[in-house]
Structures are given as C-alpha cells and as structure tokens.
Amino acid sequence: MRCFTQKRLNSLEPTPPMLTVSPPAQGVRAKAATDGRTIYGEVREAILNGAFSPGSRLPTERDLADQFHATRSTVRKTMSRLAAEGLIVRHVGRGTFVSEGIARATKPEEEFSLAELLEARLLFEPNLPDLVVERASEADIDAMDACVEAMRAAPDWVSFKEAKYALHLAIARASGNRFIVSIFSQILASRRRAGWDRAGERPMLLSAVREAAYEENVEIVDALKAEDADTARLAIRNYLVRTLSAAGMS
C-alpha cells in the first residue's frame, strides 16, 4: 500500500494532458472497483493511524480523484462507505471531516468487553425498527444494502467486521436519533480499539461465519425494506443473542 499522508494529499501534482482511448465497459468497471478499494484503504488507514486528526478536514472529492486518477463518482461512493462506517462526516457546502472521537484515548484496562457491548446493544437495537420504518430514506436503505454486500465480499476479518458494524450504524442512522447514533459510534470505536478480537489470529474463521452473518443481516434489512418492524425487531434480537452466546464460548 502506498504511503498516504496529509502532506502528500496537499501537494498534488497536475497530471499532464494525454490522448486516451476509452477502455471497454468491463475495464471501466474493473478500474472503478480497484480505485475504490485503493482510496478506501488509504484514506481509512490515514484516519486510523492519526495522519488526519479528529475534526480535521479531508481533501475534496476533486483532489482525491486527481490524486488517485479516479472518477468523481468512484470517490463519492468510497467516501459514502467511510461515512457509513462512522469514520468521516460530510457537510454540504463545508466539506468532509474526520469524525470526532475516532482517536479518543482509552486505557486498555478501561476498554469494554464484547459481551458488555452486546448486552448494551440488546437494550436498544431491537427497538430501532419502529423508528427506521417511519423515518428511513431511500439513501438509508441503499447504505444498508451496500453494507451487507461489503460484508459478504470482505476479503479479511477486519473488513468483515467493519462492514458488519457499518450496517448496524446505518440502521441507527436511519432511526433519525442522533443520541442513538452517538452511542453506536462509541461502540464501534471500542471494537476498533480492541482490534476486532485480534483479527490476525482468526484467518480461518472468516469463511465459517461470513455467510451465516450475511444471511442473518439480510433478513434484518429485508424486513426493514418491507416496513415490517416486528420481523425486523425479532431478527435483530435473535442475531444479537446468537452473537452474545458465541462470544461467551470464545
């Protein structure tokens, strides 16, 4: 992965004009997918390693598109994914900023356990569908769909966990309740600090749990799409209870 720093982004060199021949459609799609993965990985790494501090402003979509030789639409989709994961906040007319609290220091002995966080989630998440069914926009539903597909396609444990938690953050956002979003953002930050339960030690576990988690979360999203709050509520509760039981056995 290329070194991605704020200095590098703020020192963009103009690309000399050149004559090009439009590649086949499949090549365009493949390049967009590759560009999206590269931009996502480097921006995410820069935020998490402190190259961009909480609250700092990120380069514009135009600057990122120039830097990575990508299209604006690819950059926009990638930034939407980072926003869904709670890493950035986008303000119309102002720009894109690193979310506050991303690098909030917490002593190891003060970190919350996975079981504690799941117990807390059980207290409020199963009750979100009533608000989501009432308030979710088409963009909220699109964000959920993108997250479940990212979960299924995740190439590694960290990407899988990021996508899974991004889905539930998207559901919290669709509730339209900023306090609930704040709570879930803190839960997400805690899991990141914990290293997703030592992801490097679980390479074989990904394939075993990914499909099951995908199916369970698709059930949740499908119920929300159908505006069936009761089914969504039960699906969320069953999913969290199963996850909590698995956490207790690990």
Image (tube, rainbow, N blue to C red):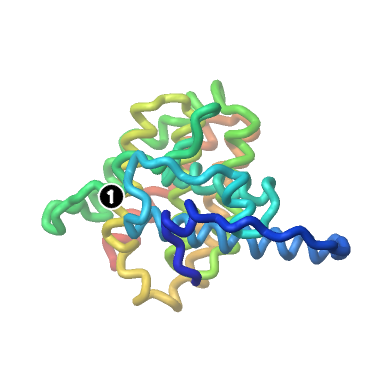
Which residue does the numbered mark 1 point to in the structure image? 103
Picture quarter containing residue 154? bottom right
Image location (x, y in percent) of residue 230: 52, 31
- Closer to the camera in the image, 62 or 28: 62
Residue at the location (51% across, 31% down)? 174
Picture quarter containing residue 249? bottom left
Left-right relation of 222 to 193: right
Residue at the location (58% across, 48% down)? 63
**In the rendered image, the vertical position of residue 121 relative to residue 78, given as above or below:** above
Residue at the left extreme? 109
The image quadrant where one finds the C terminus is: bottom left
**In the rendered image, the vertical position of residue 149 relative to residue 169, given as above or below:** below
Image location (x, y in percent) of residue 111: 18, 53
- Closer to the camera in the image, 194 or 18: 18
- Element at label 1: loop
Disc 1 packing (10 Å; few <14; some 14–19; many ≥20): some
Image location (x, y in percent) of residue 245: 32, 57
Image location (x, y in percent) of residue 53: 32, 47
Residue at the location (58% across, 62% down)? 37
Residue 121 visible in rendering: no
Picture quarter containing residue 181? top left
Residue 77 visible in rendering: yes
How many numbered discs, if any? 1
**In the rendered image, the vertical position of residue 236 relative to residue 230, given as above or below:** below
Left-right relation of 113 to 162: left
Residue at the location (41% across, 30% down)? 127
Left-right relation of 234 to 17: left
The residue type indicated by label 1 comes to: Ala
Residue at the top extreme? 134
